[in-house]
Amino acid sequence: MQLSELTRQFEHFWPRSAAEEWDRVGLTVGNPNASIKSVLVSVDLTDAVIDEAIAENCQLIVTHHPALLRGVNSLVEGELKGGLVSRLIQSGIANFAAHTNADVQVDGATSELAKRLGLNNLKPIVGIQSGFGHGVLGTLAHPVGLREFAEAVAKQLPVVARKIAFAGDPTKSITRVALCSGAGDSFIERVLETDADVYVTSDLRHHPALDATQTPRVNGNLALIDVSHWASESLWVKTAVERIASISGIKGVASKVATDPWTEEVF
Ligand SMILES: [Zn+2]
C-alpha cells in the first residue's frame, strides 16, 4: 500500500484534529509514494528501533513520541536528530507519530491500563476532544490497600530498571483511581478536584508530588503512584499493532526494544 494511502487510514485511527496544539503528529520522515508492507510500532524512535525495523523488513515505523517534537535547525549526521533522520532516509524507512491524538482514543495506553486493572465507570480526567479524553477516572470493584494496588499496577507493566514508587499510607483504602499514562503531572490540579483516592502517572517531580500529597481534601489526601513513562505507554504498542494489522495487506510488528532510558536502580 502507498504510504500516502496508509496515512489516510491512520487519520481515521488517530485524527490529527485530536492532537494537542503543541504536538507534532503525523508523517515525520518518508516518501508518500513509497510502498509499505510492514509497519513497526514503538514508543520512541532510537537507533536500536531503526535496527529492528531493518531486521524486520519494515518500511515504516509508527512511534508514540514524535521524533521531531521540538524545532530542529540542522540534520547533521553524527548528531542526535540528524543521525536518526539520515538513517531513516538512507534505509528507505518512513516515520509517523501518533501521540496525544492516540492518547485520547478508547484503546490508548491509559484506557488499556485501566482495563487491565479492572476499573469500571471510566470517564476522562480532562474533557473529550474526540473519542475518549486525557487520563481516566474509574472505580475498582473492591477496595484494596494502597500498597496492594501499587503491586497490582506493577504486575500490569513490563519490568524496567526503576521500581514503582507510591506516596501515601500503605494501608489507605483505594476505590477511586485516576490514571494517566506518560507524564501526567499537568493534570494533578484536576485530579485533586475529583474524588480519586490515588493518581497513577509517570515522571512526577518533587514539588508537584509533594504539594499534591499535602493538599487537604474532603475525601482524604491524594495518594500517588509513579510508574515508568515508557512502561506505561508501551501498552499502546499492542493496541496500535492491532489497528494497523486490521488494514488489509499490511503487517503490524510490535517493537521488542525497551526504550526506557534507565539501566539500574541502586540503594
Ligand atoms: Zn509519553
Image (cartoon, rainbow, N blue to C red):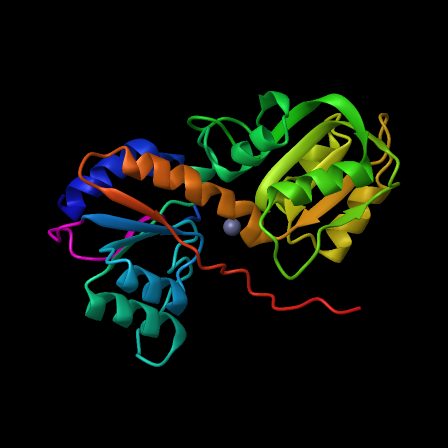
Question: In the shown orientation, is residue 87 left or right of residue 241?
Answer: left
Q: Residue furthest left?
A: 33
Question: In the shown orientation, is residue 216 left or right of residue 66?
Answer: right
Q: Is residue 204 magenta?
A: no
User: How many circles with numbers are drawn on the protein?
Assistant: 0
Compared with residue 144, is residue 39 higher up or lower down, i.e. above or below?
below
Question: In the shown orientation, is residue 226 left or right of residue 160?
Answer: right
**Where does residue 184 sit, x and y in percent of width and height?**
61, 44
Work out whether residue 196 or residue 44 is closer to the camera in this orientation and state it.
44
Q: Give the position of the C terminus as an image quadrant.
A: bottom right
Residue drawn where x is 35% and y is 81% of the image: 78
Work out whether residue 199 or residue 210 is closer to the camera in this orientation and state it.
199
Q: Which residues are magenta?
A: 24-36
**Where does residue 52 sit, x and y in percent of width and height?**
34, 62
Work out whether residue 72 or residue 247 is closer to the camera in this orientation and state it.
247
**Where does residue 186 sit, x and y in percent of width and height?**
62, 44
